[in-house]
Amino acid sequence: MSLRLGDIAPNFQAKTSIGDIDFYEYLGNSWGVLFSHPADYTPVCTTELGRTAALKDEFAKRNVKVLAVSVDPLDKHIGWINDINETQNVSVDFPLIADETREVANLYGMIHPNSSENFTVRSLFVIGPDKKIKLTLTYPASTGRNFIEVLRVIDSLQLTANHSVATPADWKHGEDVIITPAVKTEDAYEKFPKGVKIVKPYLRYTPQPNVD
Ligand code: BEZ
């Protein structure tokens, strides 16, 4: 059975490029992004890990710890990180998990046998501080992920975890948000002092509550 939204993200211990870790201990009270890539020394993966390293401050700003995983061994990870740093002009300092036994890949259903018997697909999990899975993404090996989109979703997840709002299509941090149907319109004005715009009784907007 694959992991679904709201499920507890399984804990594991692993060898990584920054040393041995216990996943839960490493995350602490942070949010987490755990993402798999098919193999080291491959071009798309090189750009993905470079992009993630370049966005280090953006992940940190959101209290998110990032971990990458593939079934390659640790010595290969270490050599490849040098290449990523050189070619992408970054410093990869988040952990790359060396999942030679496929423990993590199997726990998280990252191997899709009809896509590849041997390698992980591009799976990505966003995990909340409660260790529950908040987002899953699965991309094929041939398509690199959009890490700005990952940050955008994290903005939405963190906002909607704390306010009775949802985010509309293509929403970006700072834009108006949708008041959830559970909030009665007569209560909305008090709950959202920045204003309430009613387009239809079921389609109501308010300025994003958690920004100045
Ligand atoms: C890549 O990362 O470039 C890649 C990996 C596996 C298959 C195709 C592309």
Image (tube, rainbow, N blue to C red):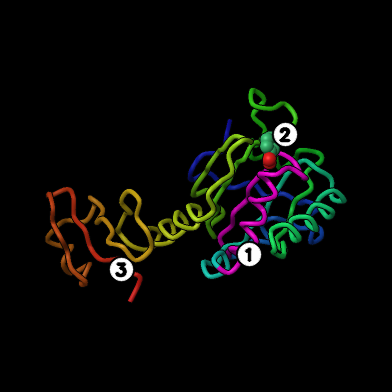
* Alpha-carbon span between mark 2 and mark 3: 43 Å
Mark 3 lies on residue? 209
In front: label 2 or label 3: 2
Is there CB contact under 8 Å for labels 2 and 1?
no
Which segment did they paint magenta?
30-57
Name the residue type under label 1: Gly
Is residue 118 left or right of 207 when viewed as pictured? Answer: right
Mark 1 lies on a secondary structure that is: loop
Which residue is identified by label 1? Answer: 28
Q: Residues within 10 Å of mark 2 (few under 14, many from 20)?
A: many
Amino acid found under the numbered disc labelled 3: Pro
How many numbered marks, from 0 up?
3
The residue at the point 77 percent across, 45 percent down is: 41
Residue holding disc 2? 119
Q: Residue at x 56, y 46 (%)?
A: 145
Q: Could you tell me if residue 94 is visible in this image?
A: yes
Label 3 packing within 10 angstroms: few (<14), some (14-19), many (20+)? some
Q: Nearer the viewer, residue 149 or 102?
A: 149
What distance separates the C-alpha of mark 1 from that of mark 3?
Answer: 27 Å
